[in-house]
Amino acid sequence: MALAAAGRFPRTRRRFNNASRSIDRVGEQALFFARAIGHAPRALMHYPRETLRLIAEISMGTGALAVIGGTVVIVGFLTLFTGGTIAVQGYSSLGNIGVEALTGFFAAFINVRIAAPVIAGIGLAATIGAGSTAQLGAMRVSEEIDALEVMAVPSVPYLVSTRVMAGMIAIVPLYSLAVIASFIASRFATVVLYNQSGGVYDHYFSTFLIPTDILWSFAQAIVMAIAIMLIHTYYGFTASGGPVGVGVAVGNAVRSSLIAVVTVTLLISLAVYGGAGSFNLSG
């Protein structure tokens, strides 16, 4: 009945075909992600030198970009200015109700749970994610990946799994820098620019900074890094259509990874803080 109706109505047939292609694409991505993660131990065992090279490239950049364009610099500056913005907005908003002394609480609460993970994820997607898509896409359209397969070099472990592992390892020091930069910027803006007492800021900051929140924040950053690298390597690995196709793949990958960053933040926040946020503000 459904097939007969689809034959009589072309628009309905197109909708069925589009839905079928979407389901096939989701299944293809899931299989690719499973292969990439499954080959991760093999990548570490057989290609440690390539993994170390990718960790260095992800962290510091290559060539001229190592000075101003490495992920360390970009993520550090992003979270630095984010922490300053949180302090400025927090001090102004809390000052309207006469409790600007709680700016330290604001910085400890917002930076760790929301701002630093999201901004770091956006920085990762725009740097190492987009770079990985462009590299793999260029290799695909120039048939370098096919050449690897001809030489009996497994392309998924060598090109994809190594990048996923490199991103997961490199995110730990990168995110440490991001969190520290956000803390420094928040304190500088509050104490130096707004002349609040350093003791008052430090008291409320240390009181409301929960160590377990920092651990969950690092876990969230690691999950984000894995999701970003899987998405970007998939789009780069399956790119087609020449240089234009590589550009389209980069755009699609960045859009998908930004959605993944926000989704991971939402799901982890609901899982960790949804029932009981382990936070009490009382006199």
Image: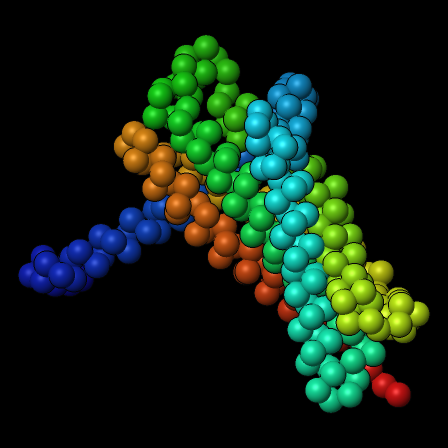
Q: Would you place residue 278 above or below residue 268 in this image?
A: below
Q: Would you place residue 152 above or below residue 211 in this image?
A: above
Horizontal and vertical percent for residue 133?
Answer: 46, 36
Q: Would you place residue 39 above or below residue 88 in this image?
A: above
Q: Is residue 39 visible?
A: no
The N terminus sits in image quarter: bottom left
Residue positioned 68% across, 47% down in the render: 76
Horizontal and vertical percent for residue 109?
Answer: 75, 69
The answer to which of 152 and 220 lies nearer the viewer is 220
Q: Is residue 258 visible?
A: yes
Name the image quarter holding residue 106. Answer: bottom right
Answer left or right for 172 relative to 34: right
Horizontal and vertical percent for residue 60?
Answer: 65, 32
Residue positioned 61% across, 58% down in the render: 118
Residue positioned 73% across, 82% down in the render: 94
Horizontal and vertical percent for residue 195?
Answer: 82, 71
